[in-house]
Image (cartoon, rainbow, N blue to C red):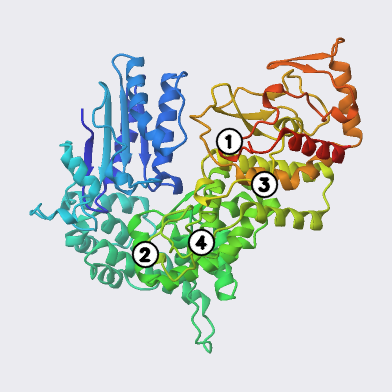
Amino acid sequence: KLPLVVTGGTGCGKSALLANWVNSRRKVKHRDEFLFQHFVGCSPRSTQLTHLLHRLESALKDHFQLREMEVPTSEERLRWSLNRFLAAAAKKQFPARIVIVLDAVNRLRGESSAADTLHWLPTDLPQGVRIIVSTVELEQSGSLHNNLDEGSRLHRTYTELRRRKCPTIRLQPLSIEVRHLIIGSFLQLNQQALQSLEQAQQFRIVTAKASSQPLFLRTILHALRLGFELSDTSIDQQIDTCLAAETPSELISRVLDTCSGYVDSTANKNPGDRTVIRFFSRVLTALFTSRHGLSDTEMWGIVELATGEPLLSEQRECIRRILRDFTFSVNGLRSFSHVDYSTVVSNEYISAPEVHVRAHHLMARFFGKLPPCARKLDALPYHLEVSGTWPRLRAALVNVQMFHLWWTSAHKTEFLNLWASLTARANPGAPIRKLVTGEFNETMRCAQPPRPCLDLVEEYVRSVDEYKFSYSPSDDGLATVILRIADFMLEFATSSLEEAADVPQFIHPPIPNDDLASLGVPFLSKDKDGNSVLNSPLIGMTGTISSNPGGVDVAMKINEEVPICSTYFYHRWMWIQFPWVSLANCGERFLKGVIQRSEQEPLGGEVASRGGKIQRPTAATDVVVDGPKLPEIQASCTNPPLQRTARSDTKQSSHQKEKRSFVD
């Protein structure tokens, strides 16, 4: 079976139809039926193809108990695995009952390619699997003309679905009877606000040609309710103003202008003051330029920062009342509830790239004042990227306190990609073409400087030096920071993000892996087949020896997961910072480690290990604190391009003696 397509112009009611159908279906569906819904645009992340596929495949795995299958994390692997998940789920029960509803697939965005080409949507569905999708027909608002040869106007999503010969349902304009029913239901819910709406006035609205579009009819009813609550203008005058518009976009523009007057009138009650501060337009601009929406408190703060005037309580209540009809809230963050609302705001209030970029500068100023927190990490980099404020973006990435938040599961992917974009050798002189934190379009292009090409190690050396000077951390605290940064640089390399930096070879002898392992530093080694193996030492900065006799978790990734890559930044970082990490293992901790090792070693001078036998140390200078050495990782280089095969063993031994003398 091919997917069923629900299509029509923007604002014709596709999302409402699917939402109501899903609600009705849930009431009567079979108990074994899998019903999945995804409405693109209902939340900031909903427009990302990766988020949709991860949600869908995770739901299939949980519902059908596909324990042997793993949900990928990258977009490319998620696209390839969707067919496998659908096929596996369809085989789990007979007959299969799988219904997937995807609204507004034309608005999906992919990481590396356009998602609206539907390369991710299977062309052949397993038995018992049904997919329902909705999309617009044209690139711009409007109805489909009889002449279908105008292929250049058709949306790529709709064109692809037609090419696949998918069955299609096209929503028709509202009939007069349906419009009467909608107005009647709306009046029942708002009897107090619109009790004075007479039959003749209702007839004028119903018979207007534009009211056949659901978005137009909904907007005019909301506008009349707002006018009744916030204005002394008569209902007839308000209807005349609304019906003068011929399209939903034109009506939305008129209504927002009227609402702006409601807010501004409460702000300028001094007859002698002719200065008009357009507070509401500032709110709309801030909502449009936000990355994932704004909370009410953030809106008030941004407006106050822009105008220098605090909002009165009456103004805030008025703005809240207006935004109730034009926005929805997800996790306390407001966003426009329909794409036409944001389009009108862009055309009316952000008409030039200069205004757009200036708004992002303002947002960056506001979020830059917040203390280190998850909200700051979510919003600030986006506005700094759009405005091209690279020094401040660099500062937000290298700050040690911010780094502790960045290097968490919720933010590390974006953190890695931001650094990849700032270390690419091709950056100087190249204009901005894409963003890590969002989508870049021509309305954002305003002579921003090109991205710099930063030296990752140099930036963090400077940042850690400032951290030491400002906070005077203990040796343990400083070593913890250094090792977390080392972990980041190693993952940066193993993710192949260092390639674009075009780094040179590391000119110093690498620090032996057994020294890194004993200090709790992750490192790369090679197995007998020459595959890269990522090793994560199980010993920490606690002064105790791991209960694992091997001391190193060797069972990690092979070449498929850890590709051949450069580890220049990681080696250089550890070469510079190794003395500080060693200092954290000196003194009492060193002596405690020697005692604990002696207590755990059996008589006979050898300690068993997963990789073989480790000789018992004969002197304190041969002991590296906290863990036994593994013979299979002694002095192996992290990857072939960086091996120093020309250096003699004598020089390497001398290097090791110098370091151990420093530790002693």
Determine whether the residue tagged by mark 4 lies in a helix, strand or loop: loop
Task: Compute the Cα span from label 2 to label 3.
Answer: 39 Å
Mark number, residue 451:
4
Mark number, residue 639:
1
Name the image quarter holding the C terminus.
Answer: top right
Tell me the residue at 64%/29% (across/down). Answer: 535
Task: Compute the Cα span from label 4 to label 2.
Answer: 17 Å
Q: Are marks 2 and 3 in contact (CB under 8 Å)?
A: no
Q: Are marks 4 and 1 in contact (CB under 8 Å)?
A: no
Judging by the rendered image, the residue that carries numbered circle 3 is: 572
Q: Earlier in the sequence, mark 4 or mark 1?
A: 4
Q: Callout 3 environment at 10 Å: few (<14), some (14 to 19), or many (20+)? A: many
Tell me the residue at 87%/38% (across/down). Answer: 661
Quarter of image, res 93: top left
Task: Compute the Cα span from label 2 to label 1.
Answer: 42 Å
Name the image quarter holding the N terminus.
Answer: top left
Image side of residue 84 versus residue 381, left or right: left
Residue 492, above or below 294: above
Q: Which tag is nearer the camera, tag 3 or tag 4?
A: 3
Task: Compute the Cα span from label 3 to label 1.
Answer: 14 Å
Q: Amino acid at mark 1?
A: Asn
Tell me the residue at 80%/44% (across/down). Answer: 579
Of residue 209 and residue 435, the one placed in the foreground of this image is 435
Q: Which tag is nearer the camera, tag 4 or tag 1?
A: 1
Q: Amino acid at mark 4?
A: Arg
Q: Earlier in the sequence, mark 3 or mark 1?
A: 3
Determine whether the residue tagged by mark 3 lies in a helix, strand or loop: helix
